[in-house]
Image (spheres, grey):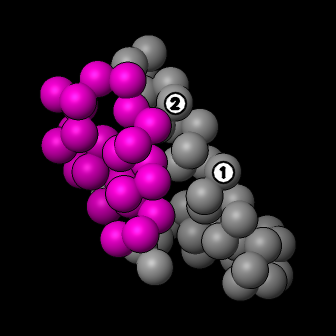
Amino acid sequence: MWAKMLAMYLAVLDDRSSEEQFIDVYNTYKRLVYHTAYKIMGDSYLAEDVLQEFFLYVAKNFSKI
């Protein structure tokens, strides 16, 4: 699951040189974001949706971070 999602986010990045940095951010925070979303939503599918939306937003705006 994680690898497929990561590939999608990398495709959205504006700057290819940021891929390694994004991968580091993704690997550092993916579980924290998922578990936080799960605690709030109480549903694993909704938590996955939150995770996807969160990292898609981060990928689209990564050059601004």
SS for dot 1:
helix
* Earlier residue among tags 2 and 1: 1
Q: Nearer the viewer, residue 18 or 43?
A: 18
Q: x and y percent of residue 26 in the render? A: 36, 54
Q: Identity of the amino acid at label 1? A: Glu
Can residue 53 be seen from the camera position used here?
yes
The C terminus: image quadrant: top left
Say above or below: 27 vs 2: above
Say above or below: 47 vs 12: below
Which range is magenta? 3-27
Q: x and y percent of residue 57 in the render? A: 59, 37
Which residue in the structure is indicated by mark 1? 53
Q: Residue at x 41, y 69 (%)?
A: 4
Q: Identity of the amino acid at label 2? A: Lys
Q: Is residue 4 left or right of residue 44?
A: left
Whole-angstrom CA distance, mark 2 to mark 1, is 11 Å
Please say whether residue 55 is one of the residues in the magenta stretch: no
Q: Main secondary structure of the magenta part?
A: helix
Q: x and y percent of residue 5 in the render? A: 46, 64
Which residue in the structure is indicated by mark 2? 60
Say above or below: 18 vs 24: above
| Quadrant of the rendered image containing residue 15 | top left
Q: How many marks?
A: 2
Q: Residue at x 50, y 25 (%)?
A: 61
